[in-house]
Image (cartoon, rainbow, N blue to C red):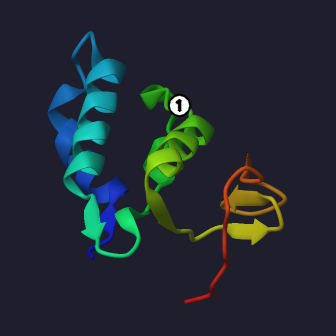
Amino acid sequence: MKTLDVGFELSKQIEELTNDSRFTLKVKSKLDELINNSVYNHDQFGEIISIKNLGILFEPNLKIDFQSFIDNLSKTNCLFLQWDGEIEKENLYFLTKTKGITINIKNLSNLQYEI
């Protein structure tokens, strides 16, 4: 199983779209394509998606609802997030707990590991 580097791969995909009038629609399409191509079928656990470097998804110009993004992915797949921010109980913090963005994960089953 390989972990998809969302920031790196999506930035390569959308580099040529910056002047496109349908920019956000095409970005979401590229993101969906990247995710779909990264699904790994595990004999015991079914479809698994493993992603990292998610900071690009918080860029305001992309208009991506991160909460919906992870909720939707986790409904039909076993989702692994390599998270570089802070995690505390039901919340993920992008960047830091005091100055970052808070994402509620209470509806996701989760285990936390330090790597």
Q: Residue 50: which quarter of the image?
A: bottom left
Residue at 62% in and 87% down: 114
Residue farthest left in this picture: 16
Residue 55 position, x and y percent, is 49, 53
Q: Residue 47: which quarter of the image?
A: bottom left
Q: Residue 42: which quarter of the image?
A: bottom left
Asked if residue 105 is positioned above or below residue 41 in the image, the reply reads above
Residue 33 position, x and y percent, is 22, 41
Residue at 63% in and 84% down: 113
Residue farthest bottom in this picture: 115
Circle 1 residue: 60
Residue at 27% in and 76% down: 1
Residue 71 position, x and y percent, is 58, 43
Q: Is residue 100 left or right of residue 30?
A: right
Give whichever of 39, 43 is nearer the camera.
Answer: 43
Q: Quadrant of the C terminus?
A: bottom right
Residue 98 position, x and y percent, is 84, 59
Question: Label 1: few (<14), some or many (≥20) within 10 Å?
Answer: few
Type of amino acid at the residue the image marks with label 1: Pro
Q: Is residue 112 left or right of residue 68?
A: right
Residue farthest front in this picture: 44
Give whichever of 58, 114 is nearer the camera.
Answer: 114
Q: Is residue 93 left or right of residue 9?
A: right
How many numbered dots are placed on residues in this image?
1
Asked if residue 113 is positioned above or below residue 94 in the image, the reply reads below
Give whichever of 92, 99 is nearer the camera.
Answer: 92
Residue at 32% in and 63% down: 5
| SS state under label 1 | helix
Asked if residue 35 is positioned above or below residue 93 in the image, the reply reads above
